[in-house]
């Protein structure tokens, strides 16, 4: 059996939560505390919420403290913010691709050491070197720095079978902006297609926020009908979501265990944030081979049982055979009597 590594990334969300930055948890061998600079927009926030100028360079500091008896090795990584399929903003590492509208990747603007070792019972400063783009921009850039402890696996034997590895990380949010000018929000419906989530059939619609601003208190109401029909086949609604600046996400409408059927459909979608609202109507098609392929993979759909049909056919063949045999035998006896 191949090794399966389950990542339970337990985010201590220093970013955007207003909790203290000096957090202790049994899973962590170190603590992280942001050193808030003078150009912090909101001094009450414990993540980096900075106003900067085009071309400006600045060094940000995170104090790392190790209270254990052994040295701790930490791997910092910078990521731009994304939005996951549940409408939750992610500030850490993700497999999602950056949106095409993202003007600058935070990883290109902020440089950090790939590895830092904090000695036992000591503290060290992690430096983030920020270089703003020379060209002015409106709105904000959002993301975060992930602080994950490097685990030493040298010399350990890998057990056969299923292996689960738990990973824990601090994620500290970072937002950079040059202007206080409010950016008008926008929303795009990119595509609608059939797919699966957790090995269950669903229809996904991809929404894109092409603007450099958050869509807060975001909510949706969606229905799917046959094209040209008014009867609702599937529907979903969700409130209290948030969409990251210049990001996209594919939201699923569950089929609740039903089989996908080939045909032409229409998505009717209403969406709104705390400031704007949108309506979309989009036709899409599910092809027969696509539906069959997904239905076979859906763990909630039972394969059809043809044994009863086979048994019925076999019984019918036997009955018909017996009838033909008795008719043949009857005619044979009748012909013998005539021959006499």
Image: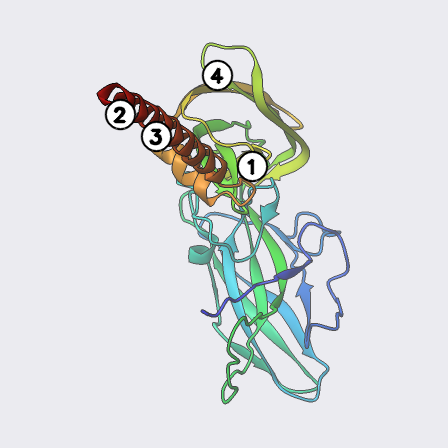
Frontmost of labels 1 and 4 is: 4
Q: Image quarter for residue 83?
A: top right
Asked whether disc 2 touches disc 1, contact meaning CB atoms under 8 Å apart, the reply is no
Q: Residue at x 66, y 71 (%)?
A: 63
Reading the image, the residue beneath label 1 is 213
Reading the image, the residue beneath label 2 is 336
Asked whether disc 3 touches disc 4, contact meaning CB atoms under 8 Å apart, the reply is no
Q: Residue at x 61, y 54 (%)?
A: 173
Residue at the extreme front: 340
Residue 334 coordinates in the image, percent (x, y): 31, 21
Asked whether disc 1 touches disc 4, contact meaning CB atoms under 8 Å apart, the reply is no
Q: Which mark is residue 325?
A: 3
- Secondary structure under tag 1 reads loop
Q: Is residue 244 left or right of residue 30?
A: left
Q: Quadrant of the C terminus?
A: top left
Reply above or below: 110 against 73: above
Q: Residues within 10 Å of mark 4 (few under 14, many from 20)?
A: some
Reading the image, the residue beneath label 4 is 226
Sequence-earlier tag: 1 or 3: 1
Sequence-earlier tag: 3 or 4: 4
**Of residues 81 and 196, which is closer to you in this image?**
196
Colouring style? rainbow
Asked if residue 248 can be seen in this view, the reply is: no
Q: Determine the CA span between mark 1 and mark 3.
A: 83 Å
């Amino acid at each position: 059996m191949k090794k399966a590594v389950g990542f339970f990334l337990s985010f201590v969300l220093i970013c955007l939560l207003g909790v203290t930055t000096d957090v202790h948890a049994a899973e962590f061998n170190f603590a992280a505390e942001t050193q808030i600079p003078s150009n912090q927009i909101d001094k009450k926030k414990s993540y980096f919420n900075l106003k900067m100028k085009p071309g400006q360079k600045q060094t940000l500091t995170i104090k790392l403290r190790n209270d254990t008896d052994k040295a701790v090795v930490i791997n910092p990584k910078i990521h731009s913010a994304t939005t996951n399929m549940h409408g939750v903003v992610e500030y850490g590492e993700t497999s999602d691709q950056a949106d095409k509208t993202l003007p600058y990747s935070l990883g290109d603007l902020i440089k950090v050491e790939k590895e830092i070792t904090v000695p036992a019972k000591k503290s060290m400063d992690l430096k983030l070197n920020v270089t703003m783009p020379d060209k002015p921009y409106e709105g904000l850039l959002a993301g975060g720095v992930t602080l994950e402890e490097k685990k030493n696996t040298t010399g350990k034997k890998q057990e056969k079978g299923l292996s689960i590895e738990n990973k824990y990380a601090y994620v500290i949010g970072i937002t950079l902006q040059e202007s206080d000018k409010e950016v008008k929000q926008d929303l795009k419906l990119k595509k609608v297609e059939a797919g699966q989530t957790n090995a269950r059939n669903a229809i996904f619609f991809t929404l894109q926020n092409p603007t450099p601003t958050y869509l807060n208190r975001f909510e949706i109401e969606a229905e799917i009908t046959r094209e040209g029909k008014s009867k609702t086949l599937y529907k979903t609604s969700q409130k209290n979501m948030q969409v990251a600046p210049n990001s996209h996400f594919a939201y699923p409408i569950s089929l609740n265990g039903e089989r996908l059927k080939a045909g032409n459909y229409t998505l009717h979608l209403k969406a709104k944030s705390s400031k704007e609202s949108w309506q979309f109507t989009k036709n899409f098609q599910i092809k027969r081979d696509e539906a069959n392929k997904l239905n076979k993979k859906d763990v909630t759909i039972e394969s059809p049982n043809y044994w009863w049909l086979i048994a019925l056919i076999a019984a019918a063949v036997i009955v018909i055979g017996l009838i033909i045999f008795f008719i043949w035998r009857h005619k044979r006896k009748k012909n013998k009597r005539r021959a006499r």
